[in-house]
Structures are given as structure tokens and as C-alpha cells.
Amino acid sequence: MVIESESRALTTLTADLGEVVRVRLGFGADDDEKVGVLSAAFAAVIWYVFTRSVATADADLPSRLDEAFDLLGHLQATETV
């Protein structure tokens, strides 16, 4: 039951984020795949931080979200010397 609830929450969150991602990053109607992937990634991060905040009774959700999204910068490819 927990998995079903989380899946519905992520699906709803992803759908809502889709339009934000599309507008913010300038994607067009033909970019549904890119919008979907990015929206799903953002939704997963938001859901993870939210559930951890609830579990640890951490009320500073905005700061935790900022930190989490900053971490995504580590995923960028960098050149090695």
C-alpha cells in the first residue's frame, strides 16, 4: 500500500512539474520525453527530501530542497585532466 501511495504522489507531482519544466527551460511540444525525464527527476528529489524531513521532524524543508538540488550539480559531466 505504501508503494502505491508513493507512486500516485510521484505521478501527480511529476505531472504538475511538467509545465513548469517546459516553460522554464523553453521546451516545445515535441520535447515531451525530455520534459518527462526532467520532471520525474525533480519529483523524485522533492519526494525524497519531503519524506526524510517528515521522518526526522526537520521543519526546514526549503533549505533541504536547496541543498538537494545543489547536489544534482555533481551529476554534470566534467573533464578530467
Image (tube, grey):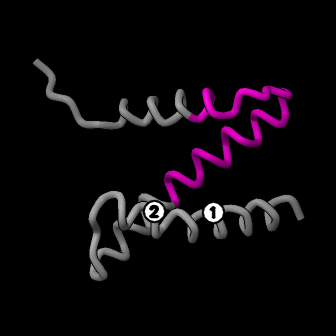
Q: Dot 1 lies on which element?
A: helix
> x, y percentage for residue 79?
14, 28
The residue sitting at 44% across, 30% down in the picture is 70
> x, y percentage for residue 68?
54, 33
Q: Nearer the viewer, residue 77 or 38?
A: 38
- Neighbours of disc 1 within 10 Å: few (<14), some (14-19), many (20+): some
Query: What segment is highlighted magenta in the picture?
Result: 40-65
Looking at the image, the residue that sits furthest to the top is 81
Residue holding disc 2 = 20
Q: What's under tag 2, amino acid-wise?
A: Val
Q: Quadrant of the C terminus?
A: top left
> x, y percentage for residue 23?
36, 65
Q: Dot 2 lies on which element?
A: helix
Q: Is residue 51 magenta?
A: yes
Q: State which mark lies toward you, 1 or 2.
A: 2
Q: Nearer the viewer, residue 66 or 77?
A: 66
Q: CA distance from mark 1 to mark 2?
A: 11 Å
Q: Which mark is residue 4?
A: none
The residue sitting at 36% across, 73% down in the picture is 33
Total numbered labels: 2
Q: What's under tag 1, amino acid-wise?
A: Leu
Identify whether 44 is placed above or below 35: above
Residue holding disc 1 = 13
